[in-house]
Amino acid sequence: MARRGRKKKFRLNLKFDMRPDVVKSILAIIFVLLGGLSALAILAPEYSLNGKVQTILKDFFGGAYLLLPFILFFIGVLFIDVLRLKMKNIRILIGLLVLQISLVSLMELFGADGGKLGERISELVVSAVSKPGAVFIFVLFALASVILISHVSINQVLSFFGKSLESAKKNLPAVGLGSKVTKKDDEESREEEAHSAMDKREEAKSKSDFEVLAPL
């Protein structure tokens, strides 16, 4: 009796190996494509696909959807290693994301359209700390996002305004003193002109009297 062997299982030996730089390239293309589609949806919403994309963005992000193309483009640029730009920093991406969340939440809190994202986040924060507290928190978040993007500290901002105020205070007395000196100089010049005019009249009168008395 013949021995029955085991049936070999069918195996599909396919490999899908991708280098890290290839993965980065694909992600860069995807995010740049998404950024381009969102930008076209903003610039040309009269086309059918662009109009649908704009409707989806407005529904989710509200009026702050205008910031989304910049975020998507920036994420795509982060995956392109050849572009050695100073702005290629994860710090800026975090700042943009925090700014997006802060804007949609503040818009919803102040009665504007913050989309589903702003509505959900604002509801959670308001239920935890009240509406004034939520406004205070999101304003601070927006300030923090600006600091992250610009890479300027609060100390630098305050010192800049302090120096500006000091220079303004120093210039104000000088301007006032200069105006007083100018007024005084004007008065003195007017007095000198009046005296010189009187002297000329007296000199002319004396000459005329001398001419009258000369024949005598």
Image: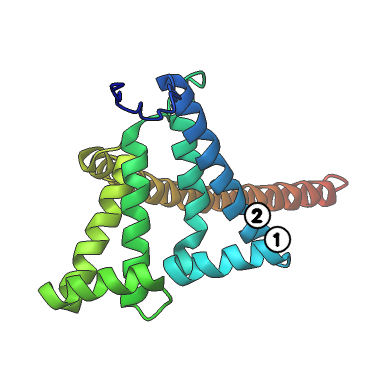
Q: Quadrant of the N terminus?
A: top left
Q: Which residue is mark 1?
A: 44
Please tell me whether mark 2 sits on a helix, a strand or a loop.
helix
Residue for point 23% across, 70% down: 135
Tell me the residue at 48%/45% (across/down): 72
Task: State how the image is colored.
Answer: rainbow
Q: Is residue 45 visible?
A: no
Query: Where residue 137 sits: x, y (%)?
Result: 19, 63
Label 2 to label 1: alpha-carbon separation: 5 Å
Figure label count: 2
Residue 210 lies left or right of residue 125; in this view the side is: right
State the residue position of label 2: 40
Report x, y in % for residue 3: 28, 21
Tag 1's secondary structure? loop
The residue at the far bottom in this view is 111
Q: Nearer the viewer, residue 30 or 1?
A: 1
Residue 87, compared with residue 203, is above or below; it is: above
Left-right relation of 197 to 81: right
**Residue 188 vs residue 143, the one in the foreground:** 143
Assess whether mark 1 and mark 2 are in contact (beta carbons under 8 angstroms). yes
Task: Give neighbour class at mark 2: few <14, some 14-19, many 20+ (Cα, 10 Å).
Answer: some
> For this rendering, which residue is in front, 18 or 188?
18
Among the 4 quarters of the image, the one containing residue 6: top left
Look at the image and tell me whether residue 179 can be seen: yes
Instruction: Name the one closer to the observer, 202 or 21.
Output: 21
Q: Is residue 40 above or below residue 124?
A: above
Counting from the top left corner in percent of width and height, residue 177 is at 37, 47
Q: Residue furthest right?
A: 215
Callout 1 amino acid: Ala
Residue at the (51%, 32%) spot, across then down: 26
